[in-house]
C-alpha cells in the first residue's frame, strides 16, 4: 500500500478521529485521577494504574478503529462495509463536541489543580525536601541472631547521614517504632516530619552480605534510587558509606570536606568486634536492666579491638544512664562513665558521641556547666542531627544557667529529630516548666504520655509540674500513678513532701527517717531530703542538704537549682544565692 493511500485509508476508517478523541478523553481521566483521587485517600498506585491502562489502551483503540466501522446497522468489520455508501452517508459531528467538551473539562481541572497547589492554604506544615528517615531493615538471614546485624546496618547508615548539616535525619529511637517496608509511607513520613524514606533488607551468610536499599519520596511513592550490594562482610563499612553518600547526593545535600571524610571513616577493622558493638547498641536502646547486657557486649568488643573508640563511647553513655534506669549508685557508675569517655576521645578526638557523653559527665559529675555546653556544642558540630546532644544541652547546662530561650530551642530541635521519643518530650516539658511556661509544658507532657502512658519518669515530672502550678490533687494522682522501684528515694520524697504541703506533716517526718535508714544501705541524694525539709518549713536544714548535694557532685539535681520551681521559696536567701553562684560559676575560676 502506497503512503498516500495508507493515510487516506486512516482517514476513511476514522482512525484520526478516534486517536484525537481518545487522547482528549484519556487526558481528562488522568486529570480526574490526579486531582480528585487524593481527596478520597485513594492510593497513588491506583493513579499510576489508571495512567498505565490508558497508555496501553491507546494502540488497542486505534486497532479497533482500523478493523471495525460503526454503521446504522451496528458495528461491522471494515472489509464488510461499502465505502461508497459510507461516503454518501450524512456526516456526523458528535465526536467534535465530545472532544471539545472533554478538552474544556481537562484544561479546567489542570488549572484548578495547579492553582490550588500553588495558591491554596496548606493543609499542614511543609516537609523539608532534604529530610530522611531510615526505617528498620528486614533481616533476610536464616539465623535470627543476625537481626542485630541488620539493625546495625540501619544504624550505621543513619549515623553517617546524621553528620551532614544540610540534611534533616530522624533518630532511630523514632524510626524503630515502624516495621520495615510498611504500606502507609506517607502517614509515617508525616509523623516523622520527613519527605523521604529509606527502606532496606540485609542478608548475611558466613562472610558474605547482601544489602538491598531503596530511597522513596513518601508523598508521591516515587522511587528516587535503589541498589543491591553483594559484598564480603569486611566491606560492610564501605557499603554503608556508599549508601549514605549516594543518598546525600540524590537529595542534593551540600557536603563539606569534613563531612565526606566522616562518612568514609571505618570505626574498626575487626568485623567480630563490630558485631559485638552492634549487640551492645541494641541492648542500650532497650534501656532498663538491658543496659547491663550492653556493658558486657561493649567490653567484649573492646577486648577484641582495644582501639575501638566507638565502643568506649558506647560504654561511657551506658554508665551515664545506668543510675536512671537500674538504680545503680551514681557515685560508682559515673567515674566509670568518665574513664570510658576519656579513652574514646583519646582514640578519636572527633567522635561526636564521645563529646556528647563528656558534656553529660561535665554537667552531672563535675557540675561544670560551661564546659558541658562546649562539649555538647562540639558534638552538634560533628553530628548536627545527633538528637541526644540537642536534648542533653537543653535540659542540662543551658537550663541550669538560666538561658531558657536557648534551652527551649534546643529541646524543640531534639523533638524535630526524634519526634516519637517520650524522654525528649518529657524533658522539653521540664524545660518549659523551668521557664514557668506551664501551659506549654502541660501540652508537651500530654504528648509524651500519649506515646508511653506507663512511662514512670513522665508521671513524676508531670506531678511536679502540676504541684508548682497549683494543682495539688492532680500532682498527688500523678505521684500515685508513677511506678517506683522498692526503696526509691525520689518516690519517697516527692510523695511525702506533697503530703506535708497538703497538711499531713507527719508523712514528711516519717519520710526523712526512712531516707536516713535507707542511706545506710545505698546512696541517697541529699536533694530529696532538702525537699522534705522545705515542705516542713525548715529552710536551714534544706540549705544544708543542698550544700551536701553540691559537695557530693549530684549535678543532676543541683545543676538546675537556679531555675528549679520546687526551690522558689529559697530565692533571696544569702546561703542559697551563694550556692547558686557556686553551681553556675566557670570552674576554672574557682
Image (cartoon, helix red, strand yellow):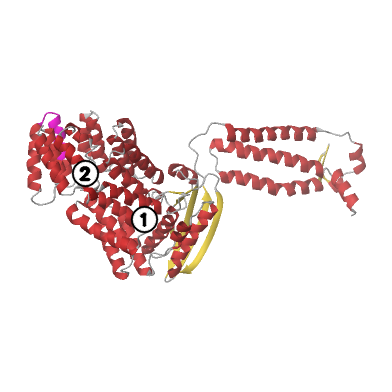
Q: Quadrant of the N terminus?
A: bottom right
SS of the residue at dot 2? helix
Q: Position of residue 348 (x, y in %)?
A: 35, 62
The boundaries of the magenta stretch are 493-504
Q: Residue furthest front?
A: 589
Q: Is residue 223 above or below residue 114?
A: below
Residue 285 appearing in the image: no
Of residue 14 and residue 455, the one placed in the foreground of this image is 455
Q: Position of residue 213 (x, y in %)?
A: 50, 58
Q: In this figure, which residue is indicated by the disc labeled 1?
A: 352
Nearest to viewer (mark 1 / mark 2): 2
Q: Contact, CB < 8 Å: mark 1 with mark 2?
A: no
Of residue 324 and residue 227, the one placed in the foreground of this image is 324
The residue positioned 17% from the left and 46% from the top of the image is 550
Q: Is residue 271 above or below residue 386?
A: below
Q: Position of residue 199 (x, y in %)?
A: 48, 54
- Asked where in the image residue 455 lies, by quadrant, the reply is top left
Q: Is residue 155 above or below residue 482?
A: below
Q: Is residue 565 left or right of residue 94?
A: left
Picture disc at residue 277: none
Q: Position of residue 400 (x, y in %)?
A: 26, 41
Of residue 186 and residue 155, the one placed in the foreground of this image is 155
Of residue 179 and residue 383, the one placed in the foreground of this image is 383
Residue 502 within the magenta-colored segment of the rendering:
yes
SS of the residue at dot 1? helix
What is the chief secondary structure element of the magenta stretch?
helix
Q: Is residue 302 above or below residue 118?
A: below
- Asked where in the image residue 207 lies, by quadrant, the reply is bottom left
Q: In this figure, which residue is indicated by the disc labeled 2?
A: 583
Q: CA distance from mark 1 to mark 2?
A: 26 Å
Amino acid at each position: 500500500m502506497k503512503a498516500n493511500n495508507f493515510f487516506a485509508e486512516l482517514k476513511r476508517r476514522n482512525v484520526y478521529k478516534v486517536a484525537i478523541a481518545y487522547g482528549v478523553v484519556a487526558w481528562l481521566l488522568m486529570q480526574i485521577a490526579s486531582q480528585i483521587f487524593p481527596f478520597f485517600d485513594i492510593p497513588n498506585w491506583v493513579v499510576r494504574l489508571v495512567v498505565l491502562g490508558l497508555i496501553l489502551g491507546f494502540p488497542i483503540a486505534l486497532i479497533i478503529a482500523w478493523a471495525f466501522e460503526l454503521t446504522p446497522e451496528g458495528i461491522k468489520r471494515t472489509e464488510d462495509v461499502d465505502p461508497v455508501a459510507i461516503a454518501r452517508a450524512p456526516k456526523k459531528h458528535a465526536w467534535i463536541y465530545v472532544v471539545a467538551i472533554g478538552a474544556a473539562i481537562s484544561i479546567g481541572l489542570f488549572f484548578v489543580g495547579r492553582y490550588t497547589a500553588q495558591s491554596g492554604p496548606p493543609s499542614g506544615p511543609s516537609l523539608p525536601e532534604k529530610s530522611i528517615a531510615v526505617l528498620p531493615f528486614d533481616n533476610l538471614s536464616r539465623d535470627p541472631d543476625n537481626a542485630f546485624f541488620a539493625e546495625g546496618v540501619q544504624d550505621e547508615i543513619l549515623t553517617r547521614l546524621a553528620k551532614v548539616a544540610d540534611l534533616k535525619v530522624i533518630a532511630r529511637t523514632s524510626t524503630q517504632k515502624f516495621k520495615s517496608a510498611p504500606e502507609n509511607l506517607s502517614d509515617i513520613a508525616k509523623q516523622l516530619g520527613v519527605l523521604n524514606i529509606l527502606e532496606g533488607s540485609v542478608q548475611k551468610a558466613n562472610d558474605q552480605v547482601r544489602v538491598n536499599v531503596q530511597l522513596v519520596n513518601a508523598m508521591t511513592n516515587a522511587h528516587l534510587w535503589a541498589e543491591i550490594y553483594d559484598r564480603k562482610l569486611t566491606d560492610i563499612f564501605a557499603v554503608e558509606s556508599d549508601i549514605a553518600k549516594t543518598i546525600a547526593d540524590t537529595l542534593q545535600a551540600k557536603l563539606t570536606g569534613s563531612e565526606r571524610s566522616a562518612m568514609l571513616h571505618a570505626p574498626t577493622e575487626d568485623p567480630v568486634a563490630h558485631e559485638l558493638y552492634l549487640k551492645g547498641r541494641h541492648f542500650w536502646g532497650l534501656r532498663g536492666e538491658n543496659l547491663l547486657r550492653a556493658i558486657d557486649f561493649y567490653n567484649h568488643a573492646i577486648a577484641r579491638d582495644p582501639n575501638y573508640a566507638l565502643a568506649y563511647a558506647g560504654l561511657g553513655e551506658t554508665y551515664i544512664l545506668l543510675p536512671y534506669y537500674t538504680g545503680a549508685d551514681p557515685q560508682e557508675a559515673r567515674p566509670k562513665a568518665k574513664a570510658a569517655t576519656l579513652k574514646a576521645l583519646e582514640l578519636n578526638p572527633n567522635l561526636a558521641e564521645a563529646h556528647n557523653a563528656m558534656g553529660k559527665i561535665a554537667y552531672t559529675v563535675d557540675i561544670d556547666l560551661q564546659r558541658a555546653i562546649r562539649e555538647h556544642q562540639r558534638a552538634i558540630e560533628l553530628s548536627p542531627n545527633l538528637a541526644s546532644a540537642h536534648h542533653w544541652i537543653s535540659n542540662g547546662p543551658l537550663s541550669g544557667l538560666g538561658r531558657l530561650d536557648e534551652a527551649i530551642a534546643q529541646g524543640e530541635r531534639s523533638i524535630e529529630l526524634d519526634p516519637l521519643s517520650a524522654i525528649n518530650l518529657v524533658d522539653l516539658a521540664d524545660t518549659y516548666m523551668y521557664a514557668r511556661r506551664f501551659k506549654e509544658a502541660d501540652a508537651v507532657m500530654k504528648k509524651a504520655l500519649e506515646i508511653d502512658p506507663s512511662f514512670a519518669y513522665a508521671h513524676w515530672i508531670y506531678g511536679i509540674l502540676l504541684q508548682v502550678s497549683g494543682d495539688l490533687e492532680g500532682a498527688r494522682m500523678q505521684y500515685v500513678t508513677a511506678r517506683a522501684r522498692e526503696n526509691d528515694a525520689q518516690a519517697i520524697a516527692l510523695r511525702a513532701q506533697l503530703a506535708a504541703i497538703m497538711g499531713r506533716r507527719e508523712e514528711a517526718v516519717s519520710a526523712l527517717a526512712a531516707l536516713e535508714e535507707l542511706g545506710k544501705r545505698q546512696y541517697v541524694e541529699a536533694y530529696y531530703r532538702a525537699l522534705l525539709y522545705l515542705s516542713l518549713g525548715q529552710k536551714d536544714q534544706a540549705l544544708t542538704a543542698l550544700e551536701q548535694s553540691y559537695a557530693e557532685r549530684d549535678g543532676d539535681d543541683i545543676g538546675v537549682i537556679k531555675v528549679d520551681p520546687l526551690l522558689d521559696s529559697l530565692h533571696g536567701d544569702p546561703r542559697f544565692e551563694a550556692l547558686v553562684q557556686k553551681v553556675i560559676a566557670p570552674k576554672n575560676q574557682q
